[in-house]
Structures are given as structure tokens and as C-alpha cells.
Amino acid sequence: MVLAGTPIGDLADAPPRLATELERADLIAAEDTRRLRRLTQGLGVHTTGRVVSYFEGNEAARTPELVRELAGGARVLLVTDAGMPSVSDPGYRLVAAAVEADVRVTAVPGPSAVLTALALSGLPVDRFCFEGFLPRKAGERAGRLREVADERRTLVYFEAPHRLAASLSAMAEAFGSDRRAAVCRELTKTYEEVRRGSLAELAAWAEAGVRGEITVVVTGATEVAEKPDEAELVRRVAAREEAGEHRKAAIAEVAREAGLPKREVFDAVVAAKKKPHTGA
């Protein structure tokens, strides 16, 4: 079986071996058969193998069929709409099943939105982790971000354009509004854009609406300071309130200083208010 990386934008980025594998394949499993047709036409490739669809909605049912073809000696080529199969795209299930069936799996290396965005971001690239797409629901998204708030490595995410502003705001809440990031849009295409700045700045920019394929790169935590306990957080908020600051603003500032989500400081303040007071 061959996993084939496809261009993420510019067809000129297609590796020469991709055309060869498309022509040699006995069976081509494509995430979108219409996009495959445009790809082969753009590359001037004539395919003779059978073409089947292989996408999120049918990969569980179609995987056994493809493994049977592989076991029977067929040369199966897997392509997705852009980039490397199985990286936030269909493919992992088939690779795992092929390995289990003792079928050789190889790849045609190709363009990667993850690595391209990372290289263009201007952020540290010596250590990074790919987090894929964030959950769509706000609560689940916030929870996922809290899990990596102290991560020292650079973080890379994919995001849909209509959810970008909400995700950047959630990142600013979880990581701190000053955390540096880059939004990479339409990589290698005509209207490629890389917007760099703080998470707060990028969230404000995205509110106007953004189009295209999006990859977000966020710098890791510069240091993991010792987390203040709840009593200390409450004390800091109270001190600011006594100095005349509004509670909401006090909570936001204490959260920023401690490198914590505002919700965590707010919950500590609310919990302290509910505790019974004991007289001396």
C-alpha cells in the first residue's frame, strides 16, 4: 500500500513520484474522487486503476475491502484532498489494518500544512506538537486547551475559518492573551497570508471573518511557574478590590499574572465566598 502526499495548494509542489504511483495503482482510494480527477488532470496523468471513495463517513466500512485487495496483491494508493493521508485526514484506520494484516506500507512524501506553517510562523521550531482540530463545543474546546496550557513545545492546530475567531479567543483565555501565535491561511495558494501577533490581536483580527484553509501555530509556555493556591488567588483579588478595582477586572488581572484561565480564578473566588465564616 502507498500513502501519497498531495499538494496543499500549488500543483507544482507535487513530487514527481506521485504521478508515477497514480499511473501504477491497481486501486486508488480517494477522499474526494472529484478532487482526484482535478489532480490527475492538472498533472497530466492517465490512471487505469479502479477509483473508490474513502472518507470519514465510509472508512470504517471500506477498510476491510481495501485490506482484502491488498492481501490479494493489489497495489492500493491512498490520497486525501491535500497533504499526507492519516494526518487529520482518513488513513490511520487503513494503515493500522494493513500493518495488522502484515501488508507492507510505504509513502510518497509530499507537502505538509503542519510543517509549512511551522516554518513560516517565525516561532520556535526545535520542538513542536501537532494538536489537530479543536473540539467544536466551547466547553470541550476550553478543556482541551487547559490540558496543554503549560506545554513548552510550539503547538500547531488546524481550524475551520468560521470557528477561527472563537478558537483564538479560547486560546487567549487558556494560554494568556499575550502568547505569540501565527495564523497561516491558504498556504502555497494565490492568496497565501501569514498573520503574526498575540492571541488577543489575532482573535480581534479574525472577528471580521477569515476565509480559506487555516493552520494556527502557537508558541509554547516560556516557563511553568509554581501555581498559586486558591487562597493566594483569592487574597490577590481581594487586595485589588480593596484598592478600588472592579472584581471582574481584578480577576482578569490576577489570572494574567498567574498564567491561569480567568475561569479558574473566578471559581476560586466564588468558592471562598461560599465557605462559612467562623468566629473567634
Image (cartoon, rainbow, N blue to C red):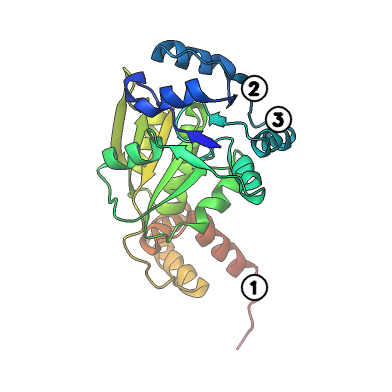
Dot placed on the residue nearer the N-terminal end, 1 or 3: 3
Q: Which quadrant of the structure image shows residue 63?
A: top right
Q: Label 3 near label 2: C-beta < 8 Å?
A: no
Dividing the picture into quadrants, the one containing residue 103 is: top right
Residue in the picture at 45% in, 42% down: 157
Precedes in sequence: disc 2 or disc 3: 2
Relative to residue 279, is residue 208 depicted above or below?
Answer: above
Q: Nearer the viewer, mark 2 or mark 3?
A: 2
Residue type indicated by callout 1: Lys
Distance from the alpha carbon under mark 2 to that under mark 3: 11 Å
Pick the quarter of the image with the C terminus: bottom right
What residue is disc 1 on?
Answer: 275
Q: Earlier in the sequence, mark 2 or mark 1?
A: 2
Depicted 53 relative to depicted 184: above or below: above
The amino acid sitting under disc 2 is Val
Q: Say which element carries label 2.
A: strand
Q: Is residue 32 above or below residue 247?
A: above
Q: Secondary structure at mark 3?
A: loop
Can you tell which mark lies on residue 58? 3
Spatial CA span between label 1 and label 3: 53 Å
Residue at label 2? 52
Specify few, some or many for label 1: CA neighbours under 10 Å numbering under 14, 14-19, or 20 or more. Answer: few
